[in-house]
């Protein structure tokens, strides 16, 4: 069979790798895979960007497996893959196992929340690929004094989040332990064109691959922007879940805080809408159960926060609802990029209050996709149904009133909902304090939009079952009447109302004043209209002071870490007199616990630091002596690593199933039977560990099997003797 250009066979991949790719269900490479895989195979550093769902994970896993080929007995991992969250690391581990199923490569995970002893055992099993979160990997590396000198490649998955989430200390120390000849790969859905922010990753002459910069979101994604007050968002959400979205479709709802999740989860339960939830402080086991429940489509709704949803992969997602519009355009792309993947269609609903409307204008500049206000005339909206995905419309008040009435009844029946709502309001105030401020240009556009545009109901709320024009006309008349009431301005002031007497002094004064002001205002309006008619720009020769993709690149910039923002927020004023300056320099405070004078800012708790071999300062808590205790407990020889070919453990996150180390067996055989009289033994342990129980049960099974076999042989021999 002749391979077509750009296909997997044309990349000269080995048969086991191709077999794993086809077994996974891949037929042709995606654009990011077609462009990235040959570069990685050539050994060059890569910084790659493509939107969510474009196949970035396979783009770095396939060349990694191709370059490694097979398992080696040499001590040490050869590839490190760093992920910002546990869920993303587990997803990558699952893909790696599937792609490498026809090779003997070993892949392990080192994640926070799992047993440290289990992870020590994983390192001793000599894996080829380690998929880890930075914090736990550094902890294990310091405990075991790992050098990572054998690492040939390091991958930063979701690189922008890794550098934004405060992993600077961990990443610096991990990179200092790697060889300078390593290959570095950075992958993310949103990366800026200038990669100065990633210089600390140790890139050497990298190749920048940025795809889909013109289409930042899927062309099959339908965007629906709904304007409503903050108080009416819950009512709008209930209406969408009940009447707009189909019952067999899966939905992710993004909420600002965990308190909103708990409150809305209770409301949905009372409305008989099954749902599950995720937030960052949720227990890891509960997270796995809830994600699996949603994966299996046992519930249609998943309530999440942005931090908890990072790395959660739902391949067949139908809808995304933004309960609060994100302040960063890059975050919006990450949210809605979970739907409309691989040629499927999807819908993203955004509930936008007036204070969030500037962020919508920022998003339209970022995506280069303008939106229009919904036509106030419902009759005209019927003709624009095909183009309602890029419209901003309001929610009918009748719908809001119906749902709010249901919510009020629930509050009357369940008293705990009132307290939960108050907690949500307090949490939302804190959320607003941390939200980024909208830029001035978007705020000006928002004010002009609200003043000049007449915004009607969004087309999704039009009842298409009503076909009689009389009913539509009545609704149109009602909407126009309400809009005219909003824009009503009286012709007379309070001095003129009800005073028809011509001799009234106040009436005459206001009449004269109006004549003067109308002339001035008329001149200004005419002057402004004359200015707007002409334009000095020549389309052929005019040069903008900003590039065409300025707003897009601005939206992709990395946010500063909390420590950097805190340092920039501090402002110290020096005294304006010599006495005040010296007072600030020499002022000390007595610490009763330390029994000495300290600086005024040093009275807070400090984390103890330790200097590593590379010269970096890290928290001393990373070195706790757990590895030495585990070695003594498991009787491990530190110079011996296992080479276990049994790779049937599908749980990469540390289940109760544990692999037995060959080094444990070897060291137990070499244990001397007799000890000198000088050695002192402690009391014998009465409780057995899980490993000891497991070993004892296996031994009993072998003995019982052997005895049954011998018994059958005796019976057969006895019968032959009789014959």
Image (spheres, grey):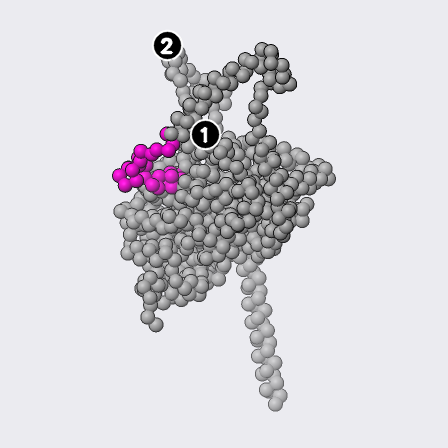
Q: Is residue 267 left or right of residue 313?
A: right
Which residue does the image show at 67% across and 41% down from the upper left?
402
Q: Residue furthest front?
A: 502
Disc 1 to disc 2, C-alpha distance: 33 Å
Q: Earlier in the sequence, mark 1 or mark 2?
A: 2
Residues in magenta, as a range = 531-558
Residue 538 sits inside the magenta stretch: yes
Q: Position of residue 674 (x, y in %)?
A: 48, 55
- In the displayed structure image, the side of residue 284 where residue 412 appears, left or right: right
| 150 relative to 508, above or below | below
Which quarter of the figure is the N terminus placed in? bottom left
Q: Are marks 1 and 2 in contact (CB under 8 Å)?
A: no
Front position in the image: 151 or 372: 372
The answer to which of 525 and 26 lies nearer the viewer is 525
Q: Under tag 2, what secondary structure?
A: loop
* Residue 577: assigned label: 2
Which percent across, then down, holds residue 590? 47, 18
Q: Is residue 81 visible?
A: yes
Secondary structure under tag 1 reads loop
Residue placed under numbered mark 1 in the picture:
606
Q: Residue at x 54, y 13 (%)?
A: 509
């Amino acid at each position: 069979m002749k391979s077509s250009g750009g296909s997997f066979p044309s990349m000269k991949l080995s048969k086991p790798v191709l077999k794993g790719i086809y077994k996974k269900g891949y037929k042709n490479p995606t654009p990011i895979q077609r462009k990235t895989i040959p570069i990685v195979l050539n050994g060059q550093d890569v910084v790659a960007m493509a939107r969510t769902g474009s196949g970035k994970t396979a783009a770095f896993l396939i060349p990694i497996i191709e370059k490694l080929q097979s398992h080696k007995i040499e001590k040490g991992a050869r590839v490190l893959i760093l992920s910002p969250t546990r869920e993303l690391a587990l997803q990558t581990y699952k893909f790696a196992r599937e792609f490498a199923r026809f090779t003997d490569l070993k892949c392990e995970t080192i994640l926070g929340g799992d047993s440290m002893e289990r992870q020590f055992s994983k390192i001793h099993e000599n894996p080829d690929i380690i998929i880890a979160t930075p914090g736990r990997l550094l902890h294990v590396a310091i405990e075991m004094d790992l050098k990572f000198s054998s690492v040939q490649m390091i991958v930063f998955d979701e690189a922008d989040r890794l550098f934004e989430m405060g992993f600077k200390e961990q990443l610096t120390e991990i990179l200092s332990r790697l060889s300078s000849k390593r290959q570095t790969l950075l992958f993310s859905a949103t990366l800026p064109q200038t990669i100065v922010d990633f210089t600390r990753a140790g890139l050497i002459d990298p190749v920048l691959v940025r795809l889909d910069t013109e289409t930042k979101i899927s062309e099959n994604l339908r965007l629906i922007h709904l304007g409503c007050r903050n108080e009416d968002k819950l009512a709008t959400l209930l209406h969408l879940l009940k009447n707009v979205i189909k019952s067999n479709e899966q939905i992710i709802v993004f909420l600002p805080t965990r308190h909103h999740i708990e409150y809305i989860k209770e409301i949905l339960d009372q409305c008989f809408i099954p749902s599950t939830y995720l937030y960052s402080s949720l227990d890891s086991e509960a997270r796995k159960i809830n994600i699996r429940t949603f994966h299996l489509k046992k519930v249609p709704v998943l309530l999440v926060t942005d931090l908890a949803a990072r790395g959660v992969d739902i391949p067949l997602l139908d809808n995304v609802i933004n309960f609060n519009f994100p302040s960063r355009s890059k975050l919006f792309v990450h949210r809605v990029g979970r739907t409309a993947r691989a040629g499927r269609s999807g819908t993203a609903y955004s509930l936008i209050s007036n204070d969030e409307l500037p962020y919508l204008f920022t998003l339209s500049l970022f995506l280069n996709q303008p939106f229009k206000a919904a036509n106030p005339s419902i009759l005209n909206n019927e003709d624009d149904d095909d183009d309602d995905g890029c419209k901003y419309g309001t929610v009918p008040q009748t719908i809001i009133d119906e749902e709010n009435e249901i919510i009020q009844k629930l509050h009357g029946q369940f008293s705990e909902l009132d307290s939960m709502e108050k907690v949500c309001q307090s949490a939302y105030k804190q959320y607003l304090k941390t939200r980024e401020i909208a830029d001035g240009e978007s705020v000006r556009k928002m004010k002009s939009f609200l003043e000049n545009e007449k915004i009607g109901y969004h087309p999704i709320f039009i009842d298409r079952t009503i076909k009689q024009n009389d009913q539509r006309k009545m609704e149109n008349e009602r909407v126009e009447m309400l809009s005219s009431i909003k824009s009503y301005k009286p012709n007379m002031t309070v001095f003129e109302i009800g005073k028809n007497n011509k001799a009234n002094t106040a009436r005459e004064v206001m009449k004269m004043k109006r004549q003067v002001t109308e002339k001035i205002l008329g001149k200004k309006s005419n002057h402004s209209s004359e200015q707007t008619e002409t334009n000095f720009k020549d389309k052929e020769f005019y040069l903008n002071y900003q590039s065409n993709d300025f707003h897009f690149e601005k939206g992709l910039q990395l946010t500063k870490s909390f420590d950097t923002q805190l340092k920039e927020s501090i402002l110290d004023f020096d005294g304006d007199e010599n006495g005040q300056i010296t007072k600030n320099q020499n002022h000390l405070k007595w610490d009763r616990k330390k029994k000495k004078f300290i600086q005024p800012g040093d009275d807070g708790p400090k984390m103890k630091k330790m200097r590593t071999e590379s010269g970096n300062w890290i928290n001393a808590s990373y070195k706790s002596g757990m590895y030495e205790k585990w070695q003594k407990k498991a009787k491990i020889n530190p110079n011996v690593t296992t080479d276990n070919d049994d790779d049937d453990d599908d749980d990469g996150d540390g289940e109760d199933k544990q692999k037995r180390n060959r080094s444990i067996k070897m060291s137990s055989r070499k244990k001397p039977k007799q000890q000198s009289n000088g050695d002192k033994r402690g009391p014998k342990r009465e409780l057995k560990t899980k490993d000891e129980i497991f070993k004892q049960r296996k031994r009993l099974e072998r003995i019982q099997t052997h005895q049954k076999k011998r018994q059958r042989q005796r019976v057969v021999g006895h019968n032959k003797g009789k014959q």
